[in-house]
């Protein structure tokens, strides 16, 4: 017996969810998740991402619009008829049951014969790296191992869509990295369709084929991790996907697809992104700021922090305040040092004012 993938696409067509008359949790969104891809719903608390996930699962019913899994309209179907499995933030393991019994539970409930349920459960534990752990109780496992049991329990049902609701939030930093790599490897190896909810930008960048950034019950931008990081649509996405310094600038000239921008007398050329001459906003990642002593924008080191693998600096000047990181930890700059600031040739991006 092997775990089979029945991956199916998910499609939202003008879907809304209202609670009562006044609360709009999800507002007329269109979304397509390709079969075999991992798509992350990312956004701050209250943006609608968890409600969207719960509508796929059938734990919330859409107020309007259509939800399709594969070619089947599941908008009004209960959770039990949707062929999806969900991995919860809390793991939701039965403490009195062994690991094997926890993984078998859904199979037994679904009517599988005892021997087949056991065979599938053992295969599921092997897939998540827990072969030989079947007799243990959840209390005898680490947090990361408990999360893997929850993943195995969902996988053995061979769902068309696998859903994750903040699966790593209860783990420490080192375990989060390991378990997210495990989840991504399993998803790719089995070709699963996965919809994954998190508020952690780094987690989303690390695991996703595509990220859906949500804001105020709607979709702010959809793209690959690199597209969102390198070419955000607006100030919200720029600041939410990784850290970004947002600096007022002036586009002094546009030639073809290249704009020349001026900040405090310093000129920098970069893609115009269709913007005309005039006021704009420049988004600059901390790693794209260059600190030196030559020509550039006058700045002063206000704060210097050593974090092991890099130095973190807060710079102030006529532009306001920026956050910058540098790899040189052996010769750090001291607070109060006057410096100049320039930008890496690739990385800074223009945003509409």
Image (cartoon, rainbow, N blue to C red):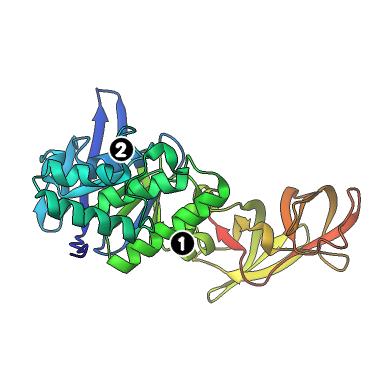
- Structural crowding at the residue carrying mark 2, measured as other residues with C-alpha within 10 Å and reported as few (<14), some (14–19) or many (≥20): many
- In this rendering, position of residue 208 left or right of residue 306: left
Q: Which residue is mark 2?
A: 51
Q: Earlier along the polypeptide chain: callout 2 or callout 1?
A: 2
Q: Is residue 160 visible?
A: no
- Residue 77 position in % (x across, y down): 10, 41
Q: Residue at x 9, y 53 (%)?
A: 72
The quadrant of the image that shows the N terminus is: bottom left
- Please, is residue 255 above or below residue 3 in the view? below
Q: Nearer the viewer, residue 335 or 120?
A: 120
Q: Residue at x 30, y 37 (%)?
A: 51
- Structural crowding at the residue carrying mark 1, measured as other residues with C-alpha within 10 Å and reported as few (<14), some (14–19) or many (≥20): many
Q: Nearer the viewer, residue 67 or 209?
A: 209
Q: Nearer the viewer, residue 253 or 64?
A: 64
- In this rendering, position of residue 8 left or right of residue 126: left
Q: Quadrant of residue 80?
A: top left
Q: Is residue 50 visible?
A: yes
Q: Which residue is mark 1?
A: 225
Q: Residue at x 56, y 53 (%)?
A: 242
Q: How many circles with numbers are drawn on the protein? A: 2
**Mark pair 2, 1: CA separation:** 22 Å
Q: Residue at x 21, y 63 (%)?
A: 5
Q: Nearer the viewer, residue 280 or 323?
A: 323
- Please, is residue 263 above or below residue 270 in the view? above
- Residue 142 position in % (x across, y down): 47, 44
**Could you tell me which secondary element the residue under label 1 belongs to?**
helix
- Residue 247 position in % (x across, y down): 66, 52
């Amino acid at each position: 017996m092997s775990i089979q993938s029945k991956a199916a696409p998910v499609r939202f067509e003008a879907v809304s969810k209202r609670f009562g008359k006044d609360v709009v949790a999800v507002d007329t969104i269109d979304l397509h998740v390709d079969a075999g891809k991992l798509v992350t719903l990312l956004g701050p608390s209250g943006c609608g991402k968890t409600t969207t996930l719960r509508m796929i699962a059938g734990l919330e019913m859409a107020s309007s619009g259509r939800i399709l899994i594969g070619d089947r309209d599941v908008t009004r179907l209960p959770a039990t008829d949707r062929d999806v499995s969900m991995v919860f933030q809390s793991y939701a393991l039965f403490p009195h049951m062994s690991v094997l019994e926890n993984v078998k539970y859904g199979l037994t409930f679904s009517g599988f014969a005892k021997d087949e349920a056991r065979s599938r459960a053992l295969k599921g534990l092997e897939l998540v790296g827990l072969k030989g752990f079947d007799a243990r109780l959840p209390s005898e496992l680490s947090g990361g191992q408990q999360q893997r049991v929850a993943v195995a329990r969902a996988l053995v049902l061979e769902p068309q869509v696998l859903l994750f609701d903040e699966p790593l939030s209860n783990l420490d930093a080192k375990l989060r990295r390991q378990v997210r790599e495990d989840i991504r490897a399993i998803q790719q190896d089995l070709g699963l369709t996965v919809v994954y909810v998190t508020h952690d930008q780094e987690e989303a960048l690390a695991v996703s084929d595509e990220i859906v950034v949500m804001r105020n019950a709607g979709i702010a931008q959809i793209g690959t991790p690199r597209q969102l990081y390198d070419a955000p649509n607006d100030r919200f996405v720029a600041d939410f996907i990784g850290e970004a310094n947002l600096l007022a600038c002036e586009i002094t000239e546009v030639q073809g697809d290249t704009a020349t921008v001026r900040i405090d007398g310093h000129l920098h050329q970069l893609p115009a992104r269709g913007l005309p001459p005039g006021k704009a906003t420049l988004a600059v990642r901390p790693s794209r700021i260059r600190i030196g002593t030559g020509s550039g924008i006058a700045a002063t080191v206000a704060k210097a922090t050593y974090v092991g693998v890099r130095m973190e600096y807060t710079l102030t000047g006529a532009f306001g305040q920026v956050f910058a990181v540098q790899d040189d930890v052996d010769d750090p700059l001291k607070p109060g040092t006057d410096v100049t600031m320039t930008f890496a040739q690739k990385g800074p991006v223009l945003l509409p004012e």
